[in-house]
Amino acid sequence: MANESANGHLHYGRALALFLAAYIAITVLASGVSMVLDASMHPQVQDDLHSTSHILSERLYPLLNFFVRTGFGRIYFGDRTPPPSARRAEALRVGLLWLGLALIVDFAGFVVIEQPFSAGVLDLDVAHFPWIYLIYLFVFSGPLCAAALKARSLRALGQPAAMQDAAAAMQDGAAVQDGAASEDGAASSGR
């Protein structure tokens, strides 16, 4: 496990769970913002997608996504300290995974499944331009921003990149030695 963390391999279970948690958090926050604006503005349009409150709240969704996705990206990395290059590569993989999942879930939730905010494919892309694209940009870049913040916090603590690389290499060596020692112990006890 330490070997995977040091090499920057993607932790799929953790990434999927945090994507789901972030998606739920964004949905709750965005719905709350929309409801507050709806209650305060007393919309005159019956169509939820074209009400003034929805159009205004839609402009806030990219900002909400930026903070929530970056926060959940930071949770993804936790206290692990892979070398900077491995952390960037892992953040890129997590961002791509989250973007792909967001596209699939949004298509299913807003186009395929009938609900009050359902939209056609063109309506989802064209009517919500540019906000939907900014949201997807922040879904992708959230883990990258989190990795950059992690690197900055490590530098602030006085751990330059060379020290991070050396610490990760030592973790790799310890993990390999632990694995070899346990195999040797198992082999000698089996004799």
Image: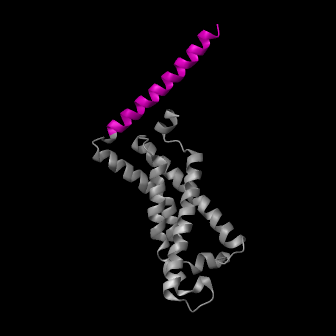
Q: Residue at x 64, y 10 (%)?
A: 190
State the residue lying farthest toward the top: 191
Residue 180 included in the magenta stretch of the image: yes
Q: Position of residue 46 (x, y in %)?
A: 63, 89
Q: Quadrant for residue 19, please give it.
A: bottom right
Residue 168 included in the magenta stretch of the image: yes
Front in this rendered view, residue 154 or 97: 154
Q: Position of residue 105 (x, y in %)?
A: 64, 63
> Where 85 falls versus 169 (above or below)?
below
Range of the magenta residues? 162-191
Q: Residue at x 27, y 42 (%)?
A: 158
Q: Is 30 left, or right, of 158 in this rendering?
A: right
- The chief SS type of the magenta part is helix
In the picture, the quarter occupied by the C terminus is: top right
Q: Residue at x 60, y 59 (%)?
A: 100
Q: Is 120 left, or right, of 141 in this rendering?
A: right
Q: Residue at x 40, y 44 (%)?
A: 84
State the residue lying farthest toward the bottom: 44
Q: Quadrant for residue 114, please give it.
A: bottom right
Q: Is residue 135 visible?
A: yes
